[in-house]
Amino acid sequence: MAGNPFLPVATASVSWVDPQGLHIHVFTTDGFTVTERAMVPGQSGWINGTLPATAEANDISAACWVDSDGGHIRLYCTAGDATTEWCLDGEGSAWYRGSYTLS
């Protein structure tokens, strides 16, 4: 848009299918703050995710897998020279900082 400064945007996404249906999580950073949007079974359309507001990054990547405990997401947020891992283990659980760090 005219008049708006250029902000780099990075996006990462993960998806899986389990007995409940299709799960999609999309993570976007504007170069500072990371936001999460999700489409999950039982919800109508896209919803705001629960990733903590303290997740900051200028670049992001993500991985996921499904096991008997449900879907697991690992989100890697790089800001400057450091990378922080954010983890979600099952729908409805809370995000937490993982043990992976690079600084």
Image (spheres, helix red, strand yellow):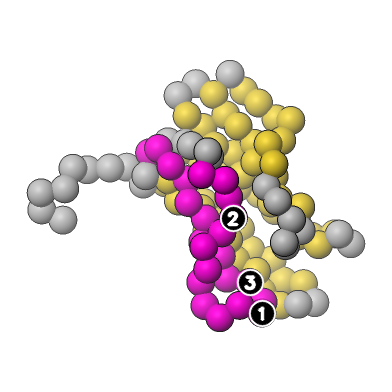
**How far separated are the C-alphas under marks 1 and 2?**
16 Å
The amino acid type found where label 1 is placed reads Gly
The amino acid type found where label 2 is placed reads Thr
Q: Which residue is mark 3?
A: 40
Confirm or deny contact between disc 1 and disc 3 (CB under 8 A).
yes
Q: Answer left or right for 25 relative to 16.
A: left
Q: In the depicted view, which residue is nearer to us: 64 or 52?
A: 52
Identify the residue shown where x is 53% and y is 39%. Answer: 55
- Which quadrant is home to the N terminus? bottom left
- The numbered mark at residue 98 is none
Report helix, strand or loop for mark 3. loop
Report helix, strand or loop for mark 1. loop
**Residue 81 % position (x, y):** 49, 21
Q: Is residue 50 magenta?
A: yes
Report helix, strand or loop for mark 2. loop
Crowd band around label 2 with a 10 angstrom C-alpha radius: few (<14), some (14–19), many (20+): some
**Residue 93 % position (x, y):** 74, 56
Q: Which residue is mark 2?
A: 50
Q: Which residue is mark 1?
A: 42
